[in-house]
């Protein structure tokens, strides 16, 4: 802070400006915590689908809070009401706060009108994780998919969000794609707004 | 010729949890590598007891006519050792780097069970890169 001697004394906590928050936490600390989250949830389920759902639910709770906080902190208490606006909010603002960088790409699905994809070469949560072969296409990015669903749902854009591994030519590791499929009502509203 | 012949990782009770061969000669079958791992574990423990210096951490280097064996023991008792060409000097750095990879890609992986054999794709990929880099550095000198 500049001019430490001149810090204003706020009598009421509500008068204080909202802090920017700590910008970074230890990656190792996060990796161990996330690993425990996955391991704990693994003991609570008997199939991979349930595990994916539980991770998504954990992420959803994060998404709800992130939307609330960021609308207040970055957007001056406004939130996006248009489809492309909210998508770019997720792709840049949310991603930057959570992972320290903008997502690698945001694309519209080619086959369906209601599908959008956020792709990441190496998703932060998957940095240290190797999924065993017997778990098939399970992706711990389900947690991030949950965050995205939490943000979209609470901003008034209900959607089904899933995480997938997509192999890339000439790369040893597949990238992770977060697939967003919006509910019908969202597209109808969007068409009405023009 | 590669500087490293083979790499072993053994858990704190002496079980082999990772083994990889890099040399062209002297490949070992699974039973032999398991035997060597537990033999080394015991020898390491005995050396600690027999050492005239108190607080000895066990054998770090075993020099033989045809190979050197460099060992690194982590604080938790997991041992990493490489069998290499005689007279290679930079092995302790490589062992520390391998330990780093182990803490990153094995211990932070939720699907790895402690003390069990290591089967992590990311560990294999990064290890191969580290060995390759080491080999290039070795040949470059």
Image (cartoon, coloured by chain):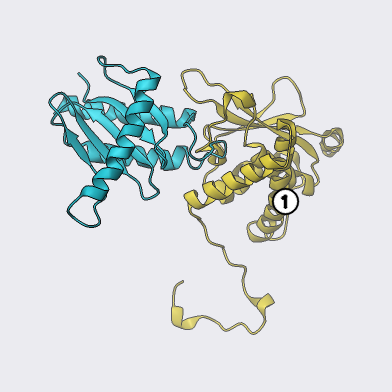
Chain colours: A yellow, B cyan
Q: Is residue B42 above or below residue A23?
A: above
| Residue A74 quadrant | bottom right
B18 and A41: which is toward the camera:
B18
Residue B109 visible, this orientation:
yes
| Residue A108 quadrant | top right
B126 and A40: which is toward the camera:
A40
**SS at circle 1:** helix
Q: Chain of mark 1?
A: A
Relative image position of residue A7 (x, y in whole percent): 51, 80
Report the residue marked by disc 1: A61
Relative image position of residue A188 (x, y in whole percent): 86, 34
Relative image position of residue A64 (x, y in whole percent): 73, 52
B114 left or right, relative to A163: left
A107 and B93: which is toward the camera:
B93
Q: Residue furthest top?
A: B25
B76 left or right, relative to A85: left
| Residue at x 63% of width, y 32% of height | A139
| Residue at x 66% of width, y 56% of height | A70
């Amino acid at each position: 802070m500049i001019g430490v001697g001149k810090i204003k004394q706020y009598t009421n906590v509500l008068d204080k400006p909202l802090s920017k928050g700590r910008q970074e936490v230890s990656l190792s600390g996060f990796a161990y915590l996330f690993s425990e989250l996955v391991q704990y949830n693994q003991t609570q389920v008997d199939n991979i689908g349930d595990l994916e759902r539980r991770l998504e639910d954990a992420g959803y709770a994060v998404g709800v809070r992130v939307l609330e906080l960021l609308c207040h902190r970055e957007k001056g208490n406004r939130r996006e009401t248009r489809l492309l606006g909210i998508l770019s909010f997720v792709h840049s603002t949310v991603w930057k706060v959570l992972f320290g960088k903008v997502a690698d790409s945001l694309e519209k699905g080619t086959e369906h009108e209601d599908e959008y994809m956020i792709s990441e070469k190496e998703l932060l949560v998957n940095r240290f994780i190797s999924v065993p072969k017997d778990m098939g296409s399970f992706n711990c990015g389900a947690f991030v998919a949950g965050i995205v669903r939490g943000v979209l749902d609470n901003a008034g854009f209900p959607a089904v969000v899933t995480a997938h591994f997509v192999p890339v030519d000439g790369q040893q590791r597949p990238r992770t794609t977060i697939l967003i499929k919006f509910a019908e009502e969202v597209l109808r509203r969007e068409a009405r707004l023009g | 010729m590669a500087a490293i012949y083979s790499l072993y990782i053994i858990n704190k009770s002496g079980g082999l949890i990772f083994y990889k061969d890099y040399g062209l000669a002297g490949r070992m079958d699974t039973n032999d590598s398991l035997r060597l791992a537990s033999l080394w574990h015991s020898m390491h423990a005995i050396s600690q007891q027999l050492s005239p210096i108190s607080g000895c951490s066990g054998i770090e280097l075993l020099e033989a006519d045809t190979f050197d064996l460099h060992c690194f023991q982590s604080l938790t008792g997991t041992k990493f050792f490489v069998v290499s060409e005689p007279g290679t000097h930079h092995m302790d750095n490589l062992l520390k780097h391998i330990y780093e990879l182990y803490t990153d890609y094995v211990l932070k992986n939720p699907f790895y069970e402690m003390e069990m054999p290591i089967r992590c794709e990311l560990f294999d990929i990064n290890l191969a890169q580290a060995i390759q880099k080491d080999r290039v550095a070795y040949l470059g000198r």
